[in-house]
Amino acid sequence: MKSLSLVFLFLVIFHSFNSYALKKQGTSCAFNIQDTIKNNIPLYLRKGIFTVTDIHPSFPGGTLALKKYIESNLGISQKLVYTDKSNRIFLKFVVEIDGSISNISCLNCPDKFIEDKAKQVVSSMPKWIPAKQTYRNVPCFYHLPIDF
């Protein structure tokens, strides 16, 4: 019982020192939350685009359906000239709250033709299942490797 009282006393003292320090700086713990409630903007929307989420975005039908979609719509394997470079490129894009794709960029495209074709295929994809953070849809970055 005595140890429980000491822990409680410690928490009360710590909280009071923390509150005093925040008031001295001119800020308070509840400022951001009250500002968010006042402006009616949820906290998860103020964080921007997520890189890590509770549930990652996914293509409808899973990874096998994504692979099949890319293979059927890319259709440039006959036109490629194989060189010493790797035949894998990485695309980075944002899966938005509604599942649409935006901000497509190529991270290591050796050829402009390949980059344009890959971006065209990704931009024409059907809507994805968006990422979720605390049970809400959120925008999230996605990195997609494509092998040629």
Image (cartoon, rainbow, N blue to C red):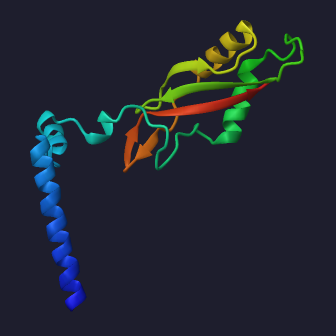
- In terms of depth relative to the viewer, which is nearer, 91 or 119? 91
The answer to whether residue 19 is above or below residue 10 is above
Identify which residue is drawn at 55% across, 19% down.
104
> In the visual, does 145 lie left or right of 85?
left
> In the visual, does 23 lie left or right of 112?
left
- In terms of depth relative to the viewer, which is nearer, 72 or 111? 111
- List x then y, in percent, for residue 7: 23, 78
User: In the displayed image of the protein, which residue is found farthest to the top?
Assistant: 112
User: In the displayed image of the protein, which residue is found farthest to the bottom?
Assistant: 1
> In the visual, does 41 lie left or right of 60?
left
Q: Quadrant of the N terminus?
A: bottom left
Q: How many marks?
A: 0
The answer to which quarter of the image holds residue 126 is: top right
The answer to whether residue 10 is above or below residue 32 is below
The answer to whether residue 10 is above or below residue 79 is below
- List x then y, in percent, for residue 84: 89, 18
The answer to which quarter of the image holds residue 47 is: top left
Identify which residue is drawn at 19% across, 65% down.
14
> In the visual, does 77 lie left or right of 97?
right
- List x then y, in percent, for residue 15: 16, 63
Q: Quadrant of the C terminus?
A: top right
- List x then y, in percent, for residue 125: 58, 24
Identify which residue is drawn at 15% across, 68% down.
13
